[in-house]
Image: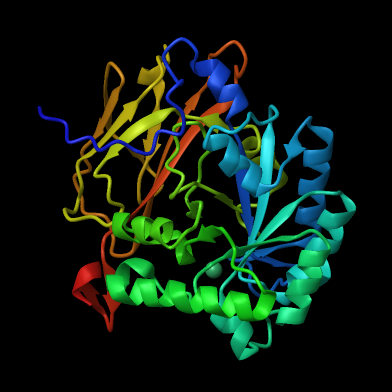
Amino acid sequence: MKLLLIRLCFATALFTVGTGHIALASKAAVILMYHRFGEGDLPSTNTTIAQLEDHIEALKEGGYTVVPLADVVSALNGAHSLPPRSVAITVDDAYRSFLTIGWPRLKAAAFPVTLFVATEGVEAGYSDMMTWDKILTLQQEGVSIGAHSHGHNHFPSLSAAAVNQDLARMTATFVRGLGVAPKLFAYPYGEASLADMTAVRDAGFTAGFGQHSGAVGPLANTFYLPRFALNEQYGSAKRFRLIIETVPLPVAAISPADPVLQQNPPTITIEVADSLSNLADVTCFGPTGAPLAVDVRANILSLTPMTPFPIGRTRLNCTLQSVDRITQGRWHWFGWQMIAGFESEGVAVHPRNR
Ligand SMILES: [Zn+2]
């Protein structure tokens, strides 16, 4: 079988079999993603105050280092190593509850935070969003500001021209509001096609972030980095303690490389770079959350789902308990998001046909 494996961005040429665990330890991180805090009427994007306080305690007690998100990116680009058990904290959408509930607690813990702002909502003065002066205050207090588009649209549903127009509008709005444009970008809904990743890179950003789970490692595509989403359902103490302990599954390539599926169900091939002696024990979970059949041959995982993925976002999660001497017992976790079209007035529409 001819493997059409398109290489992901290799962050370091030094990553080779045999030195894998060294690179893993020095270039690995877990990135967390929050939205709202203490807004119990919106549980799907909210984290309760009790959950947040518990997360902060877990990070303080467990030997973790909460690092600025930009440090994760510069480490992946080869500039330096990261401390063991590095965690980065991100918050999307600039809701007021970050200012009033989230930030005071994270600031007291001296944890760096990156806030991803979609500029249209701020500019329009939506009632649950912060104004520019509040965002400026946060920036002065040490919060890093990242970019999250202008209109918060589904990028893969837009034409290339519309994506570029959105990015240009966003940048101009940031310059007006903050005097400077951010360098890190989080895709709205974590949705990006390969073309969208290229557009974000060409617009001058240094990294792009999705909303798929998984630990970041030295082989990660820096324009589609995973983040673990926290909300009331997925923010329990037990799950939080599990995800901050995860380590990367060293995936060198995935096919199809474009998250926007041209074929549904897709035939998925994942090439694992490092020699993991127990790779045959990997479990991959598909759209329903149920395990998918995985054929493991040497370092290649092949998945051939029998039923089409539902219209919209589907997340793939592959996990494997580590038997490595350093990371023993922790979970290797690779996640990826795929898009099988959008609902439009009840009709499934292919992303590029809109
Ligand atoms: Zn958002």
| Residue drawn where x is 46% and y is 59% of the image | 190
Residue at (48, 79) in percent of width and height: 169
Residue 290, by quadrant, is top left
Asked if residue 298 is positioned above or below residue 254 in the image, the reply reads above
Q: Please tell me in which quadrant of the rendered image residue 277 appears.
A: top left
Left or right relative to 40: residue 248? left
User: Where, quadrant-wise, is the N terminus in this rendering?
Assistant: top left
Instruction: Answer above or below: position of 76 versus 201.
Output: above
In the picture, the quarter occupied by the C terminus is bottom left
Residue 151 appears anywhere in the view: no
Whether residue 167 is visible here, answered yes or no, is yes
Whether residue 63 sits left or right of residue 312 in the image: it is right
Counting the numbered discs, the total is 0
* Residue 342 spot, x, y in % from top left: 29, 70
Q: Is 196 above or below relative to 152?
A: above
Q: Position of residue 8 (x, y in %)?
A: 35, 38
User: Residue 266, how many percent across, how many down?
Assistant: 20, 47
| Residue at (55% x, 49% y) in the render | 227
- Height in image: 200 above or below 13? below
Task: Name, please, the residue furthest toward the left.
Answer: 1
Q: Nearer the viewer, residue 170 or 249?
A: 170
The scheme the figure's colours follow is rainbow
Question: Which corner quadrant of the figure contains ligand 1?
Answer: bottom right
User: Which residue does the image show at 11% across and 29% down from the upper left?
Assistant: 2
Q: Position of residue 24 (x, y in %)?
A: 55, 24
